[in-house]
């Protein structure tokens, strides 16, 4: 054990909690992807040195309290409206890095008009879209991205397309719009996936200063409480089912 | 020498915004106020003052753009007409809850529903009593001429920032479409980044190491925190009532009968007052300029002086409820209104006045 | 070149989600038998085979893992 205490010295630290995360204990359930995405957003802002030039817009949903965790200026939007807030913020303060952080209910259901038109106008903002196929905060109801057959509290017998319609692949829809610059779908269930998502978020932040349009990073995520699985089982379920409907990878990059 | 230009009320809003250093306008077309955005787009203020003008995809989006811009401490505004304002009510409630300053112009048309495109005053209650959810008030100011439309933009922002509260300029189709000469006051530049930091230290301007992060939100979750906040809002509204009531009087000093009317109706009641005065009947007119705060003390005072009051409105009787509350039974209060976009003549009002007061 | 590493876990913030355990290539993390003040069984180092790759810390939703590493 002596070797271990020798290693635990500040000069040997290779990875730790980003300074931009506040001391608040996150309210998310154990294993929730939100915490991981918050962390890498904080890392990107920290590494780019843009804390004083970044404005985050939080949604309604589990991540409504994102402002409690990342130490930057925040606006908390009404349900689905974050892209409208971001539009005005970026247009009025073009020197600022502006991003929204939204879940699938917020972005792909009630806020469909706002996201489509922000994309269509080519707003120079970053959108981080957490897709776990369920409404987490209100207790696990069906979301637009809920898979067919998936049980939720409002589809207790599984999502039936005749009754509930089909899952919405909004990311592919947005890629078809001329105003979007960079569209990708990632996840955070492994270290490699976390690295890719972080690079994508960083690219989005960089693009937002290049006047090339909107960057959209979907993170396929878990909601283990809503899915009624353990965090580890939820990750496995996501790989097996969610990735089939929502395959990972870059969908569009206008600078490539 | 000040410049006077013939323009519509709607155009006056746009020209005033540019000349008074407004940072951004976000709107959606709707009759009878589309000239506001059309004028702004024609004037291209982004090339001169740097003002941002954007046509949003809906009123929902425009009010939330206003929320975003106001969060940055900017002077931002929108305009719409009744159905559009209904859509905006969600955002207005959020802005009241997040204590954000902004100016919203409502050029009222007939309702309910899609209603008509003709003038109306049927959104008095919506604007003055709330409209959105939760205990809140907007400051509501009612112009009666294109000159007022011009002047109230700057006044509206002054009030909005003084109290960190949304301000509604409650106009109607007549005031929006009416052309009159408007006196243009000296230009005010847009505020600099330094001035915004000074005037709006709460704004999301990017967190420097020297301060805590600024969070614009209307969410509490904790009942006690929310109650405390509600009471803080109440205290703010009480201060507004104390300091900001504004009204215009016409022949009230010796009045035995009083009309109470706002906006375009006050102009028609002025003519009705003149007719009655010529007949030897001592009529007077009180025009509330601020509908919230309502001039309740003034009306209470006049209730002891006059034989009766009549509230004249282009609706089924909305402001009359506030008049009755202020009068509190000290004199009879009558009402006359037209609806659907129809407008009364001074003679019609005189007839109704006589009927109500059993004169002649 | 080889690395020797170790991790430090903020046990009071750990929610015992175990996502780190599956992500450790050397299988050197486990859940403790004890619980923290919130009642969660927290993650702990199970053996000395850690090479300081930081995979565990990267996937940790609550950012409770600090990673140290030296070349040997």
Image: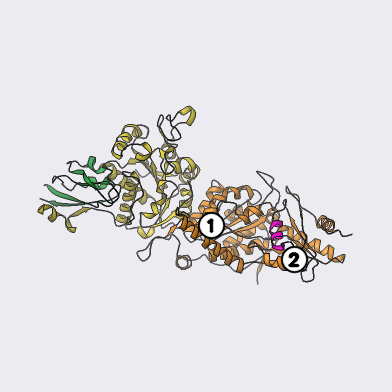
Residue B308 occupies quadrant: bottom right
> What chain does mark 1 sit on?
B
Q: Nearer the viewer, mark 2 or mark 1?
A: 2
What is the drawing colour of chain B? Answer: orange
* B181 lies left or right of A60: right
* Residue at 30 percent of width and 50 percent of height: C38
Q: CA distance from mark 2 to mark 1?
A: 33 Å
* Residue at 32 percent of width and 55 percent of height: A21
Circle 2 Cα neighbour tier, 10 Å, few/some/many (<14 / 14–19 / ≥20): many
Residues behind callouts 2 and 1 on a single chain: yes
The reply to whether dot 2 and dot 1 touch (C-beta < 8 Å) is: no
Q: Which residues are magenta?
A: B319-328
Q: Position of residue C18 (x, y in %)?
A: 26, 42
From what the image shows, is residue A151 above or below residue B76?
Answer: above
Tag shown at residue B73:
none
Tag shown at residue B303:
2
Residue B262 seen by the camera? no
> What chain does mark 2 sit on?
B
- Work out which quarter of the rendered image holds the N terminus of chain B and state it: bottom right
The question of residue B323 being in magenta is answered with yes
What is the drawing colour of chain C? Answer: green
The question of residue A121 being in magenta is answered with no
Q: Position of residue B58 (x, y in %)?
A: 55, 46
Q: Which residue is mark 1?
A: B96
Q: Position of residue A121 (x, y in %)?
A: 48, 46
* B124 lies left or right of A133: right
* B295 lies left or right of A42: right
- Work out which quarter of the rendered image holds the C terminus of chain B and state it: bottom right
Q: Could you say which chain is coloured yellow in the image?
A: A
């Amino acid at each position: 054990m002596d070797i271990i205490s020798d290693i635990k010295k500040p000069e040997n630290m290779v990875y730790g909690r980003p300074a931009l995360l506040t001391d608040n204990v996150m309210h998310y359930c154990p294993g929730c992807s939100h915490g991981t995405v918050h962390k890498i957003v904080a890392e990107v802002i920290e590494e780019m040195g843009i804390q004083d030039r970044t404005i985050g817009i939080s949604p309604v949903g589990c991540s409504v309290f994102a402002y409690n965790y990342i130490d930057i200026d925040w606006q908390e939007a009404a349900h689905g409206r974050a892209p409208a807030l971001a539009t005005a913020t970026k247009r009025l303060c073009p020197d600022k890095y502006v991003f929204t952080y939204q879940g699938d209910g917020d972005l792909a259901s009630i806020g469909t008009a706002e996201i489509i038109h922000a994309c269509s106008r080519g707003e120079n903002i970053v959108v981080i879209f957490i897709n776990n196929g369920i409404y987490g905060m209100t207790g696990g109801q069906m979301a637009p991205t809920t898979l067919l057959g998936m049980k939720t509290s409002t589809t207790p017998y599984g999502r039936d397309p005749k009754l509930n319609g089909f899952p919405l692949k909004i990311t592919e829809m947005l890629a078809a719009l001329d105003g979007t610059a960079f569209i990708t779908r990632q996840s955070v269930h492994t270290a490699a996936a976390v690295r890719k998502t972080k690079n994508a978020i960083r690219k989005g932040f960089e693009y937002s200063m290049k006047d090339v349009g909107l960057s959209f990073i979907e993170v396929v995520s878990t909601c283990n409480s809503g899915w009624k699985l353990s965090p580890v089982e939820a990750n496995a379920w996501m790989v097996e089912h969610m990735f089939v409907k929502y395959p990972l990878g870059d969908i569009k990059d206008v600078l490539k | 020498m000040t410049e006077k230009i013939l323009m519509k009320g709607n155009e006056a809003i746009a020209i005033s915004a540019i000349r008074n250093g407004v940072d951004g306008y976000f709107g959606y077309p709707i009759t009878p106020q589309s000239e506001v955005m059309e004028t702004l787009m024609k004037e291209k203020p982004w090339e001169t003052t740097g003002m941002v003008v954007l046509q949003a995809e809906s009123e929902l989006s425009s009010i939330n753009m206003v929320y975003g811009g106001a969060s940055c401490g900017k002077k931002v505004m929108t305009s719409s007409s009744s159905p559009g304002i209904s859509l905006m009510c969600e955002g207005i409630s959020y802005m009241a809850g997040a204590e954000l300053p902004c100016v919203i112009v409502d050029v009222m048309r007939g309702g309910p529903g899609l209603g008509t495109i003709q003038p109306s005053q049927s959104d008095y209650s919506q604007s003055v009593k709330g409209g959105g959810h939760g205990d809140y008030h907007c400051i509501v100011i009612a112009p009666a001429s294109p000159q007022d439309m011009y002047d109230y933009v700057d006044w509206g922002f002054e009030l909005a920032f003084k109290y960190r509260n949304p301000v509604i300029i409650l106009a109607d189709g007549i005031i929006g479409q009416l052309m009159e000469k408007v006196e243009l006051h000296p230009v005010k530049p847009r505020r600099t980044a330094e001035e915004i930091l000074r005037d709006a230290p709460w704004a999301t301007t990017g967190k420097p190491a020297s301060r805590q992060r600024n969070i614009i939100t209307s969410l509490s979750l904790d009942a006690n925190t929310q109650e405390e906040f509600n009471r803080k809002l109440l205290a703010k509204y009480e201060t507004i009532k104390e300091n900001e009531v504004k009204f215009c009087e016409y022949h009230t000093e010796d009045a035995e009968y009083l009309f109470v009317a706002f906006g375009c109706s006050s102009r028609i009641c002025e003519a009705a007052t003149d007719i009655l005065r010529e007949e030897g009947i001592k009529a007077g007119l009180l025009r509330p300029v601020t509908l919230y705060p309502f001039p309740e003390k003034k009306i209470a005072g006049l209730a002891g002086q006059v034989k009766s009051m009549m509230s004249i409105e282009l609706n089924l009787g909305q402001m009359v409820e506030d008049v009755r509350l202020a009068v509190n039974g000290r004199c009879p209060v009558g009402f006359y209104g037209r609806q659907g976009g129809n407008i009364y003549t001074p003679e019609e009002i005189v007839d109704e006045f006589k009927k109500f007061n059993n004169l002649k | 070149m080889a690395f020797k590493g170790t991790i430090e876990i903020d046990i009071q913030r750990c929610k015992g989600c175990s996502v780190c355990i599956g992500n450790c290539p050397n299988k050197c993390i486990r859940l403790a038998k004890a619980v923290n003040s919130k009642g969660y069984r927290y993650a702990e180092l199970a053996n000395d085979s850690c090479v300081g790759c930081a995979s565990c810390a990267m996937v940790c939703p609550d950012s409770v893992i600090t990673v140290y590493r030296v070349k040997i």
